[in-house]
Image: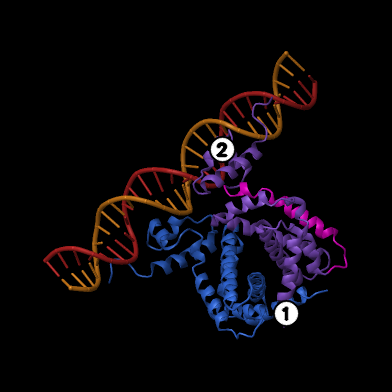
Chain colours: A purple, B blue, C orange, D red
Amino acid sequence: MGRWVPGARGRLQRVAFELFAERGFEQTTVAEIAARAGLTERTFFRHFADKREVLFAGQDELTAQVVGALAAAPAELSALDAAAIAVEASTEVLGDRPDGPRARQTVIDAHPELRERELIKMEGLVAAIADGLRDRGVPAGAAALAASSAVAVFRMGFERWITAEDGAMLDACIRQALVELRQVAAAP
Amino acid sequence: MGRWVPGARGRLQRVAFELFAERGFEQTTVAEIAARAGLTERTFFRHFADKREVLFAGQDELTAQVVGALAAAPAELSALDAAAIAVEASTEVLGDRPDGPRARQTVIDAHPELRERELIKMEGLVAAIADGLRDRGVPAGAAALAASSAVAVFRMGFERWITAEDGAMLDACIRQALVELRQVAAAP
DNA sequence: GCACTCGATGTCAGACACTGACATCACTAG
DNA sequence: CTAGTGATGTCAGTGTCTGACATCGAGTGC
């Protein structure tokens, strides 16, 4: 057995989430998180750039999944369809049950500082999708708008998924939101 | 003449912008801003909730302008058209010359913390537009998507406006972006 | 087995953002 | 003239985040 207990990063994430859910984000200090994880404050900041980041560690994985799905999408699809298929692939990361994501979203929505971080992560997803679309030959302007639209569709689908009472699947919610977006954008 | 020089708030904004542009956001302390404005750190925080907010004081005005334009838009317009007309009204606040907004955007884009704040302000604009659309009788889902699309269109139009070399007007850039969005969203 | 490096952590000091409580002082209403 | 108001100053304190250096177990080469 090593000098220290392995899995420090995961422990910090789990403990931080518990404390944020119990007391709220601002009422929890980094020192408390670290102590309950059997570590020091300094070690927390070696694993996470700041106090908020501990809640968003999975974001890179989601982005990678979406970008991979975009690259694998059939070439003949329109920009928006390809981007929509890509964000649907988020189901691979988020799973079937909305319980976990819902609990996490509840914590985020309760604290503006965390909402800010979530928004910039979403903006990173938009940029990654736009990059992928340009790689498919989509012009820059259309790529940016399609990526932005796809993420808006994802966000609406995600929100319905975690609030739905009928157990709807995430990909179905996303597809439904895409249909609505096209209706909204249809020329008058 | 009063005990203190009037215009403290405006002085803080101007000085803060200068220092952020010269040295960067992180290399500037609130104490320095306050000192150069002839005030104390404590007074800075009486005028602005935090260090970033000093750059975003005009946002409320822009949101109010957009919401007002939305309420005044013809009732027969589609949700997206009404929202697009509303964001075009931002010209009333932003003016004709892109120089100022461009300089401000340069500072913001250089610092992730400021980008976060900008994003949550944009999200506030989305929410305000969605509210206004619901007041017009637009269903919640369509309102959210139309608001989100309109702000995406505004952002693309704004970016082209401040980077354009041909002196294009902001409202024209926004209208052009709206056309592109409709092309992107058109059913395949 | 020994020296040596490496990686994760601990320790410590400090800068800076932000807050609460209380003091000051010109101005103003009565 | 006096009491009250509002913007500011002063001060002490908490919490986030960083840099520099120390520690110690585990692997590595010899």
Mark 2 and mark 1 in contact? Answer it, CB < 8 Å. no
Instruction: Return the residue at label 2.
Output: A34
Chain letter for the residue marked with disc 2 in the picture: A
Tell me where residue D28 appears, x and y as whole percent: 78, 27
Image vertical order of residue D20 relative to residue A148, above or below: above
Tell me where residue B67 appears, x and y as whole percent: 55, 76
Q: Is residue A72 magenta?
A: yes
| Disc ID at residue A25 | none
* Magenta stretch secondary structure, dominant: helix
Instruction: Return the residue at label 1.
Output: B179
- Residue B169 visible: no
- Count the labels in the image: 2
Q: Residues within 10 Å of mark 2 (few under 14, many from 20)?
A: many
**Amino acid residing under circle 1:** Val
Tell me where residue B64 appears, x and y as whole percent: 51, 75
Distance between the Cα atoms at labels 2 and 1? 52 Å
Work out whether residue B9 or residue A164 is closer to the camera in this orientation and state it.
A164
Work out whether residue C12 or residue A19 is closer to the camera in this orientation and state it.
A19
**Amino acid residing under circle 2:** Ala
Tell me where residue A80 appears, x and y as whole percent: 78, 68
Q: Quadrant of the C terminus of chain B?
A: bottom right
Left or right side of A131 for D19: left
Q: Where on the picture, by quarter, is residue B26?
A: bottom right
Question: Label 1's element?
Answer: helix
Question: Label 2's element?
Answer: helix
- Residue A34 visible: yes
| Residue span colored magenta | A51-77
Q: Is residue A105 magenta?
A: no
